[in-house]
Amino acid sequence: MTELAEVADTRPRPEYGEYASPAEQAEAMGITEAELAAVSAPKAAPGKADEKPAAAVDTPAESASPLPPPRAEDAIPLPPPAATALPASRRWDRTATFAMLFFGVYALVISVASFRELGAAMQQTTEQFGYGEFTSFALANSFGFWLSLIQPVIFVITAGIALIRLRAGKLSFFVPLIGAVVSGIVVLVFLTILLYSDPALSAAFQSGQ
């Protein structure tokens, strides 16, 4: 035991707190244990901490071939939209509209032909019903001329409105009816003026014959 004690006494004594506890080392250095731990932590090797994983090599922008701008001639033409069939609720409207327009053409041809001979037609009517002699030939022929111009204009306007509404898919059968009513009103106004302008016809109507 004496020899062991002598050997132990011959060992070099610790210097600078080698075997001291962290608290004792911090106290001896005048710092806290947290600061001691930060100072004693192993430092990363220089150049390793700042290293970042190598990024993928990008192709330089100048090496990429730019796409040419789009041109109008390169556009691909789209097929025209397929024509949709008319629903059953609209087919009757188209049929009725065209039927009345065709009838309007037939009536227009007959009426224009009679308007050109309106003076003779009024004379024949006056004699047939015994109203006397019709004397307003000039006025009747003038009215007939204007009616032969106005009636086709009314029909063209009516047909144009009807066709526009048909193309738009709107209800159109009533348009020829309205055109016929307007045409009839115009004819009635002209004939009324003519009847009351002729002495024989005016006297007949005033007497109630």
Image (cartoon, helix red, strand yellow):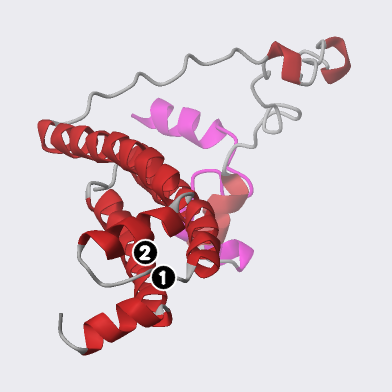
Within-10-Å neighbours for mark 1: few <14, some 14–19, many 20+: some
Asked if labels 2 and 1 touch by Cβ distance under 8 angstroms, the answer is yes
Q: Is residue 147 above or below residue 94?
A: below
Q: Position of residue 129 (x, y in %)?
A: 20, 65
Count of numbered circles in the view: 2
SS class, disc 1: helix
Q: Position of residue 17 (x, y in %)?
A: 57, 50
Q: CA distance from mark 1 to mark 2?
A: 5 Å
Front residue of 28 and 85:
85
Front residue of 85 and 165:
165
Front residue of 201 and 73:
201
Magenta-tinted stretch: 1-30
Q: Which residue is mark 2?
A: 187
- The quarter of the picture where the N terminus appears is top left
Q: Which residue is mark 1?
A: 190
The residue at the point 24 percent across, 54 percent down is 177
Front residue of 81 and 76:
81
Q: Horizontal placement of 135 versus 92: left or right? A: right
Q: Horizontal placement of 25 versus 120: left or right? A: right
The residue at the point 56 percent across, 55 percent down is 36
